[in-house]
Amino acid sequence: MTNFWKLKDFRPFSVLYAYIEHEDYLADALFIQEQISVRFSQEMVKNGEKYHVIFGRVRKKDCEKFEKALEKLPDKMLLCGHTDYADFCNDIDEKLRLGMKELLA
């Protein structure tokens, strides 16, 4: 399951990420626990959805810690009762991949 994407960017000291988050912002506690500074830039949400796509920038030296923190997010979602998180992430990932195939075809 993919719940985050590393996006191409031209900044020398930071990396732009997009990740799927719950409306309660459960990943924030993981970032604090791992002492990761994230500069949030945008948030996308479809009306009525409880999951958001968050765009944020992380220092290059923190990328590994950031990705490890997001790997813990599905477990935290399950503990909080959000059993459809993995399905939502898989659906978004599939839509992105299909869109890329259409662009490259």
Image: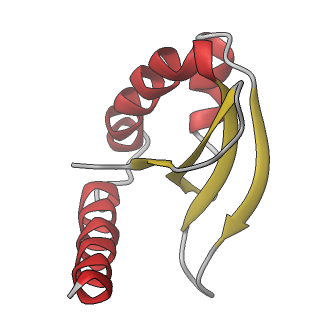
Q: Is residue 54 above or below residue 38?
A: below
Find residue 20 and report its horizontal and vertical position in percent.
49, 55
The spot of residue 71 in percent (x, y) is 35, 30
Q: Is residue 61 visible?
A: yes
Q: Residue at x 32, y 86 (%)?
A: 103
| Residue located 52% across and 24% down the image | 66
Percent position (x, y) of residue 94? 23, 72
Q: Is residue 24 visible?
A: no
Q: Nearer the viewer, residue 38 or 77?
A: 38
In this rendering, the count of numbered labels is 0
Where is residue 86, by image quadrant?
bottom left
41, above or below 13, in the image: below
Judging depth in this view, the residue of 47 and 4 nearest the camera is 4
How has the structure been colored for display?
secondary structure
Residue 96 found in image quarter: bottom left
Q: Nearer the viewer, residue 80 or 46?
A: 46
Residue 105 placement (x, y as % from top left)? 20, 88
- The part of the image, by quadrant, that contains residue 92 is bottom left
